[in-house]
Image (cartoon, grey):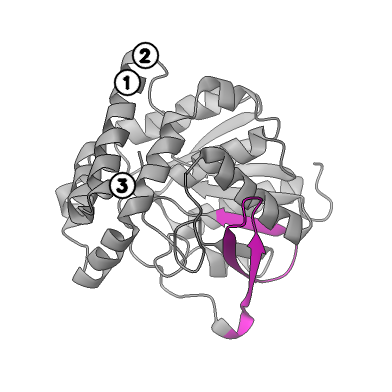
Amino acid sequence: MDTAPQPAGPARVEEAARVEGTVRSADGTVIAYDRTGEGPPVVLVEPALHDRTLSAFDGLAPLLAPHLTVVRYDRRGRGASTDTPPYAVEREVEDLAALVGALGGPVLLHGFSSGALLALHAAAAGLDVAALLLVEPPLGDDDADERARSRAFTADLADLVAHGRHAEALDRFHEGIGVPPEVLAQTPPDVRATLERLAPTLVHDCRLGDETTLGTLHAVPVPALVVDSAGSSPDLTGWAARVAAALPRGEHRSLPGTWHGVADDALAAAVLDVARAHVLPGAEG
């Protein structure tokens, strides 16, 4: 489960400052990325329905670039990255492993919503991650009934995508995760078209949710700051608190923001707090 499209930030990172690149994952999938800024690397992991052309991080990246090397990438099946079926969560972790290897690690991982789940899997798998900053990772109750409902939802989406019914899959996703109608009403037609193009990858994000358990969280060895937005609904803020409590080195913080979206300035300050503690010069580690 995941997020609705977020409004674009006030400014994109200047093209002149961006360096483009690609890495090849273990199964041959080409992962496209860019980096800007200077300093230790922070890798930004997009949520569902986002790639670098429709990024959740357009407002955040310029605030971090004066202090950190900001790395954004297209998850497999999105943007300029390729895809190699069948999908597995492990393949997305391998994508991040290839990227972290190219950067030289250790890295700070910042994941939003389902991107936060992927960051958790990467840290649990032992990638060279110094710390995590996670926004509202969508992890419901870890019981049999909840997991059965989640897997049925994923199966419904997979069936719609398999039959080319991308618009229906998108609507079913938004309905299933409870996106407020007023948020959906703000989606411009061109953005809607991009979301429909990305709809097949919704199954990837739902699989991430299905396969993230308390065991995954308990296996994360690094410090993790888990934040929620003060403007989110109780289910979303509950996700953040529950994940932070289950992580061996987890911390929970509420920040100003709207529904399922933390204000960029507050989020940048939190990321830099984590960076000063774990990756910037003088950090304690």
Give the Cα separation between the discs numbered 2 and 1: 6 Å
Residue that label 3 marks: 259
Q: Quadrant of the C terminus?
A: top right
Q: Position of residue 192 (x, y in %)?
A: 23, 64
Residue stretch in magenta: 16-44
Q: Mark 1: which secondary structure?
A: helix
Q: Is residue 39 magenta?
A: yes
Is residue 109 among what the camera can see? yes
- State the residue position of label 1: 148
Residue at (50% x, 24% y) in the render: 213
Give the side of residue 228 with respect to residue 19, left or right.
left
Q: Is residue 179 visible?
A: no
Q: Position of residue 146 (x, y in %)?
A: 33, 20
Q: Is residue 139 above or below residue 36?
A: above
Pointers 1 and 3 in contact (C-beta within 8 Å): no
Q: Secondary structure at mark 2?
A: helix
Q: Is residue 72 above or below residue 272?
A: below
Q: Which mark is drawn over residue 30?
A: none
- For badge 2, the amino acid type reads Ala
Q: Nearer the viewer, residue 189 or 223?
A: 189
